[in-house]
Image (spheres, grey):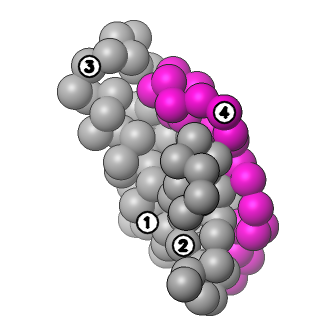
Amino acid sequence: MKYGTTGTVIQATLRSQDLLTAFARELEDLVTKNPELPLTEREKLTKLVWDAREVKDFDSELAADLVNELIDALTGFAPPGNYFGAHPDDGADFGFWQSE
């Protein structure tokens, strides 16, 4: 399995529009890099990427839910001993970080 790279994916923003765009792009890239994923998993993750791209109301509950779903999906690509989420010292710096 090809994992995400430890470090920042997006920083200095908490806007749903920015997070959805960056997280969807990262997830799409990781799905592409992992062709061995089962077809059902690839389809599920690809649908999540497209759902994120189709959001029109970035202040909606749907947008917030999709941000959380993308975080969960990206966590599945975290290198061993890492997680995907906000940096422990900066809540507006999202990426793959070593678990403490």
Mark nearest the camera among 4 and 2 is 4
Using the image, determine if residue 16 lies above or below residue 33: above
Name the residue carrying label 4. Answer: 12
Q: Say above or below: 76 vs 8.
A: below
Q: Pick whichever, 88 or 70, lies toward us.
A: 88
- Residue in the image at 40% along x and 61% along y: 72
Q: Amino acid at mark 1?
A: Glu
Residue 36 as seen in the image, left or right of residue 76: right
| Label at residue 96 | none
Name the amino acid, label 2: Tyr
Q: Quadrant of the N terminus?
A: bottom right
The kind of residue on which mark 3 rests is Ser
* Residue under numbered circle 1: 41
| Mark earlier in primary sequence (3, 2) | 3
On residue 60, the disc is: 3
Crowding around mark 1 (Cα neighbors within 10 Å: few <14, some 14 to 19, many 20+) is: few
Residue furthest top in the image: 56
Q: Residue at x 50, y 24 (%)?
A: 15
Residue at image coords 53%, 55% = 86
| Magenta segment | 1-23
Q: CA distance from mark 4 to mark 1?
A: 31 Å
The CA distance from mark 3 to mark 2 is 26 Å
- Counting residues from the N terminus, which is met first, the one under dot 2 or under dot 1? 1
- Residue topped by disc 2: 83
Do residues under tags 1 and 3 come within 8 Å of each other at their CB atoms?
no
Q: Nearer the viewer, residue 17 or 12?
A: 12
The verdict on residue 15 being magenta is yes
Q: Secondary structure at mark 2?
A: strand
Side of 2 relative to 83 (left or right): right
